[in-house]
Amino acid sequence: MKKKHNALLSGPYLVWTAAFIVIPLILIVYYGFTDENHHLTLSNIAKITDPVTLKALFLSLLLSAMATVICLILAYPLAMILARMKNGASAIITTVFIIPMWMNSLLRIFAWQTLLERNGVINQVLSFLHLPPQHLINTPAAIALGMIYDYLPFMLLPLYNALTKLDWNVVNAAYDLGANRRQTFFKVIIPLTMPGIVSGITMVFVPALTTFVISDFLGGSKVLLIGNIIDQQFTQVGNWNAGSGLSLVLMIFILISMAVMQHYESDDEGVSSIL
Amino acid sequence: MKKFFTRLYVILIFILLYAPIAVLIAFSFNDSRTRAKWGGFTMKWYVQMFQDAEIMAALRNTLVLAFVSALIATVLGLMASLSLNRMKKRKRTIVLGILNIPMLNADIVTGISLMLVFIAFGQFLSQYGYTVVFGFGTVLLGHITFNIPYTVMSIMPRVQGINPSTYEAALDLGATRSQAFRKVVLPDILPGILSGFLLAFTLSLDDFVITHFIKGPGFDTLSTKIYTEVRKGIKPEMYALSTLLFAGVLLMMFGIEKGRNARKKSQQYH
């Protein structure tokens, strides 16, 4: 009786998981390793060595790594400031930094066009200050800015959560034992908030690496990321095999980044178990 | 001095996050079809957006999709959480790992894989004379799929926190299974269910990438509509609608916060 009950409970989502998570991934692998005549081939994977695609992949890796590091550097001090505020104030001010996410994200990225354009808001401010205008839009830097802007809350939230859970007595103990500010920060605060840092990094890096919207809106059609190439294969070229092959390559990078992060996370558990 | 820099820092990041939103709100009051120049203040887009059939259809699709997908994902997430809790640890880790794939994987890969599976289902069903039409149905299935891990994530900790003895005690005291569940278990996990639903609703509302690959022609949500409009110029009505939605969410959050405070206060007095 109890067994039957559990099967009724778990049946629907197990079927769902199989149909819409497992089979779809198997299909990507299938399409990625076959040609349009269903013959086994490696040519879809090999498409990554095409100069344009390879350049897009490198640019994606570079910009998403940059955006992740800058997000971390920007968000960590902010999270510390917020976490050390009085209880009520902290919650309200943190909400203030999350609220922008309620505006449609495509529109928010699009709005940066107006800020970065040749006659845009930023250049108008610059000319008002008698400074030379800058070429901002349709550059890799504009895309990196878009990534930082769009994913900063994803970095901020886990860091804030980790820092509010941090036992500040431990920090004070480090000071009492003669550690200076720097030592305390790098040897106590950072290791203790490592789970937050790790989840923040993955939450920024993966979407930044695979975006095609930000590069579409802020890179014009001049700067292509790997996401744009895959999107084109599916929506314009109609070559699903090539698109799947490139997606598989992309997934390898996602898996590598996750494995690296997992490694650091387990390291941290070692530290906290000693404490 | 340190306090000054702290303030300055918080304000600078605040400006970074709100500058684009300020721009969008300004556009919604701009009396000019192009965003290149300021044509004076107007409220007309707020009136005209209700007469734009395409925008209203996209709005309706977005809201219905968010509500229905969040609802079904919450039910499935609740069932999953309850049964996962009873599984052996090893099996649970594997199932949970697979369930979490859409949350960890890149949206573009999830979108593509769902597109491929809908095409494959279509080919399979065509043998029996059925077809899979890309549109509301496929998008709904996709949204439920990427919402489930988030509802499980919200509900699961609550289910694990339940003391199984209370449920058994209710049964011993003569409650039926469904009574024991509704009156003993459910109240404990309700906060998780609600926050899971809200999270799923918001994620569905804002999704673009997955919808982009599985929507098919002729069906649009607000996000996909904005994406196609960016190339030919966004209608000012869209800014007005987004500003209105943004203000709506803000008010709702303030309302919830106020309600919570009021309840806290009244609890203190009684």
Image: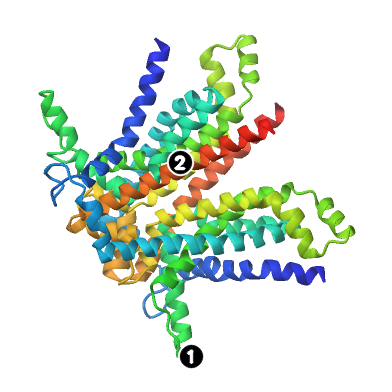
Instruction: Specify the subunit that label 1 lies on.
Output: B
Which image quarter is the C terminus of chain A in? top right
Rendering coords of residue A23 (x, y %): 53, 70
Task: Please tell me which residue is depicted at 41% across the width and 40% down the height of the picture.
Answer: A99
Rendering coords of residue A199 (x, y %): 52, 41
Amino acid type indicated by mark 1? Tyr
The residue where tag 1 is placed is B128
When asked about the image quadrant of residue B197, the answer is bottom right
Q: Nearer the viewer, residue A136 or B228?
A: B228
Does dot 2 land on a helix, a strand or a loop? helix
Mark 1 touches mark 2? (CB < 8 Å): no
Which image quarter is the N terminus of chain A in? bottom right
Does dot 1 land on a helix, a strand or a loop? loop
Note whether A109 is above or below A169 in the view shown: below
Note whether A208 is above or below A84 in the view shown: below
The residue where tag 2 is placed is A154
Note whether B82 is above or below A191 in the view shown: below
Q: Is residue B116 visible?
A: no
Amino acid type indicated by mark 2? Phe
Instruction: Specify the subunit that label 2 lies on.
Output: A
Rendering coords of residue B125 (x, y %): 48, 85
Task: Please tell me which residue is depicted at 42% across the width and 29% down the height of the picture.
Answer: A73
Left or right of A54? Residue A21 is: right
Q: Nearer the viewer, residue A42 or A181?
A: A181
Rendering coords of residue A104 (x, y %): 35, 50
